[in-house]
Amino acid sequence: MATFKMPALFVGHGSPMNALEDNAFTCGWRDAAAALPKPRAILCVSAHWETRGVYVGATATPETIHDFYGFPKALFDVRYPAPGDPAFAHRVAQLVQGSKVHLDHGRGLDHGAWSVLRVMYPQADIPVLQLSLDTTRPGAFHAGLARELAPLRDEGVLILASGNTVHNLAEFSFRDPAPLPWAERADATIRARIEAGDVAALADWTSLGPDVQRGIAGPEHWLPLVYAMAQRQRDEPIRLFNDEVIGSIAMTSVQIG
């Protein structure tokens, strides 16, 4: 049993090309990992595994899933051969009492997980499994489920949530990365709620105004933030990093604890 409480992280993962690049965002991820004790295991909640019902990956050898198109071959060649941990998957399923968690014995790691982990833990020597997002359920459901996972932090497990707080690809332009005014306003509103530790407001994102709603084209990139923020215990510090808006995407990332 670990003798410390592992911090929880939310990372704005942005483009999967970050897996191959050395930039300010990847430096932020790398620095965050370097400042943490080495996790016993990583439970990743990624924007890119949406399900009806809740599932946890329970394969011993998760494959690297290339769930995108139109990118260079070098990105499709990337493999992140981290082991799984079926016994840990059973532990996650048993820990959650408020909802049935199903075991998925075939699920690999999608790019919301491996594009970040390849930078943070390049040796791929830490067991990694993913928890799915039932995007048919409201934010309060996800906050409650996340709180049930909190004991894992006392066992040396890193809860890593991966999405984007502002993520509107329909208004994104590769030709012009200048931040859009509405996206900057949305980011400022969201950062204020994060710094206040206001999980209830973050879970009910429709209450945060039209700019925030414009940035949440679908809940899948937003809900991982709720999982990270719901981990916060009383008086735990909140640290923001990678706080930058590119066009209509915010890369803002958060460390709890």
Image: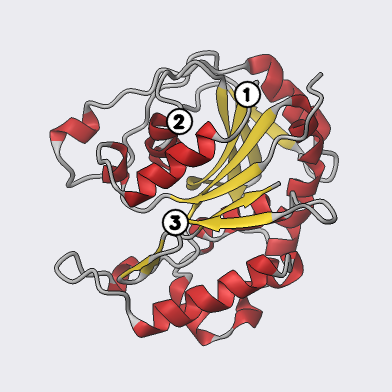
Q: Within 10 angstroms of label 1, few (less than 14), some, or many (20 or more) residues?
A: many
Res. 255 visible in picture: yes
In space, the residues marked 1 and 3 are separated at their CA atoms by 24 Å
Residue 100 in percent (x, y) is at 76, 39
Quick check: 56 above or below 182? above
Quick check: 55 above or below 103? below
Q: Which mark is residue 109?
A: 2
Q: Nearer the viewer, mark 1 or mark 2?
A: 1
Q: Residue 89: which quarter of the image? A: top right
Residue 155 in percent (x, y) is at 77, 26
Q: Within 10 angstroms of label 2, few (less than 14), some, or many (20 or more) residues?
A: many
Q: Which is more toward the observer, 188 or 139?
A: 188
Left or right of residue 222: residue 179: left
Disc 2 marks which amino acid? Leu
Q: Residue at x 41, y 77 (%)?
A: 183
Q: Residue at x 18, y 64 (%)?
A: 174
For label 3, the SS is loop
Cβ–Cβ below 8 Å for labels 1 and 3? no
Residue at mark 1: 41
Q: Which mark is residue 209?
A: none
Disc 1 marks which amino acid? Ala
Left or right of residue 78: residue 201: right
Left or right of residue 41: residue 153: right
Residue at mark 3: 242
Which numbered disc, 1 or 3, marks the residue that appears first in the sequence? 1
Q: Residue at x 54, y 61 (%)?
A: 222
Res. 135 visible in picture: no
Which numbered disc, 1 or 2, marks the residue that appears first in the sequence? 1
Quadrant (top left/top right/bottom left/bottom right) for the N terminus: top right
Disc 3 marks which amino acid? Asn
